[in-house]
Amino acid sequence: MGSARRTFLSAGIVALALFFATETMAFRTPEALIRAIYLPLLDDTAPLPAPIRIYGADTLGLIRTFQGHNSGGLGFLPFVDGQNVDIAAFSARQIRLDGVSAEIVVKFTNFGEPNRLNYSLVREIDGWRIHDISGMWASGPWSVRELLVADPSRLGLAEAMASP
């Protein structure tokens, strides 16, 4: 094999490895993670990051278990606390940061309705990821992690879980 071909193959392997690394790599700062989630929602130019990039390992485990038992999903997009998106007046504020975790409060309007979400982030080996997202409904507080482990009948997903 000629040296030019070896160089080309080596460059291709490196490019492929970098592509897959960026597809699963977490974020260097909590702000970068929040920006990656909301930028596509604010200007509709790119898809949301894949769950493997934004959720921590234990939360991903809960999501996978939930998806294995439910075909209907949560029924809403946690990042906007709704099913449809028309975000304006967005702000994010870091309220706590230590070496392994962070708390960020995100405020925005969605279709003119004010929303406030709390992000609990964890620092994993490759960067920052979501541990939980929480907010407030008229019926009380909610959290993604609690919804993922809740009784499906409480979430209105009993029909989605019923096997034919």
Image (spheres, grey):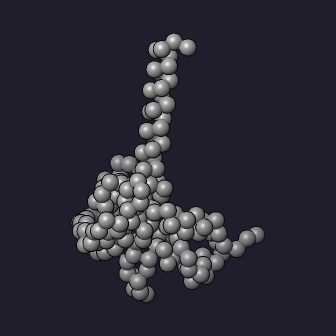
Splitting the image into 4 quarters, where does residue 141 fall?
bottom left
Of the pair 8 and 93, the residue shown nearer to us: 8
Residue 138, can we see it? yes
- Residue 134 is situated, as x and y percent measured from the top left of the image, at 39, 75
Q: As rendered, which of 105 and 72 lies closer to the eye?
A: 105
- Position of the C terminus, as image quadrant, is bottom right
How many numbered callouts?
A: 0
Q: Is residue 114 above or below residue 2?
A: below
Rendered position, 77 above or below 25: below
Pick the front one: 47 or 27: 27
Residue occupying the far right of the picture: 164
| Residue farthest bottom in this picture | 139
| Residue 45 locus on image (x, y percent) | 35, 48
Residue at image x 49%, y 78%?
146
Q: Is residue 81 visible?
A: no
What residue is at 56 percent from the left and 80 percent from the top?
Answer: 150
Q: Is residue 123 left or right of residue 154?
A: left
Q: Position of residue 95 (x, y in %)?
A: 25, 72
What residue is at 31 percent from the left and 71 percent from the top?
A: 103
With 106 as the anchor, is 140 left or right in this view?
A: right
In the picture as drawn, the residue positioned furthest to the top comes out as 2
Q: Residue at x 45, y 63 (%)?
A: 56
What is the quadrant of the N terminus in the image?
top right
